[in-house]
Amino acid sequence: MPPVPPSPGPPAAPSADPPEPPASDPTAPPAADPLVPALARTWPVGVRPSVVRGWEPPATAYSRGHRGVDLAAVPGAPVRSVAPGRVSFAGRVAGRGVVSVELSGTGAPPLRTTYGPVRASVRKGDEVLAGGVLGTLEAPVGHCGSASCLHWGLLRGGTYLNPLPLLPPWLLSRGPSRLLPLSGRGALP
């Protein structure tokens, strides 16, 4: 008779941590990334835009994926640099406007944010501050279907990274609800 393998022991206790949401869930807060410091001081468009499509890292350099996040915004909206840096590219790529900014103080090679489709108001070599206007959002070009969105990307060298961890928690949070005092007019009895 063959030997009986040992018992694996008691079943593991369930984890107290909630399961991670899928990477494609645009409402999920970004996971901490040691490669991406939370140095942004503003969203690239609006105050707290909706994430239309989230970060979907490709399995290989040439695989399908989404190498950035899409943020809902209207054509003509100002597009801002999320952190200080130097414009490394401002021009057209495949018929759409793109602006890239190398972020100051992020090592070598520096982190580089990309924004598109943008009608640039800056030029290569310009220094920009956090919140500085890079241009305006162009009309939809099919990336987000018929909707309008800003594609915001992040790279270090040739490696694409999720740009959302650039945003510190205070920019990601909608903040607590605030109740306003009732005034004498229109107050309930």
Image (cartoon, grey):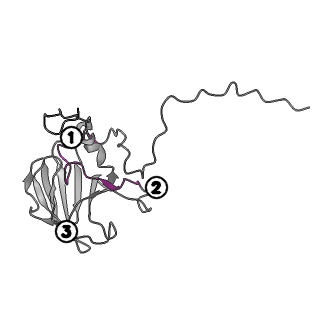
The location of residue 131, given as percent across then percent down, is 12, 49
Which residue corresponds to the image point at 44% horizontal and 57% vertical from the top-left? 60
Q: Nearer the viewer, mark 1 or mark 3?
A: 3
Residue 101, magenta (yes or no): no
In the rendered image, residue 153, in percent from the top left (x then y), is placed at 28, 55
Q: Secondary structure at mark 3?
A: loop
Q: Which residue is identified by label 1? A: 39
Magenta extent: 36-57
Quadrant of the image occupied by residue 68: bottom left
Q: Residues within 10 Å of mark 2 (few under 14, many from 20)?
A: few
Q: Label 1 vs label 3: CA separation? A: 26 Å
State the image coordinates of residue 30 (x, y, percent, origin top left).
35, 43
> Which image quarter holds the C terminus?
top left
Q: Which mark is residue 59?
A: 2
Tag nearer the camera, 2 or 3: 3
User: In the rendered image, which quarter is residue 34 located in?
Assistant: top left
Q: Amino acid at mark 2?
A: Ala
Q: Tell me the residue that label 3 is attached to.
A: 138
Label 2 vs 3, first from the N-terminus: 2
Residue at (24% x, 48% y) in the render:
48
Q: Is residue 142 left or right of residue 81?
A: right
Cα distance in 3D space between marks 2 and 1? 27 Å
- Across and down, in percent, residue 156 comes to 28, 50
Q: Nearer the viewer, mark 2 or mark 1?
A: 1
Gap in angstroms between the C-alphas marked 2 and 3:
30 Å
Are the two marked residues, 1 and 3, in contact with CB atoms closer than 8 angstroms?
no
Left or right side of 26 for 178: left
Task: Identify the amino acid type marked 1.
Answer: Leu
Label 2 SS? loop
Q: Residue furthest top?
A: 10
Left or right of 140 in this view: 89: left
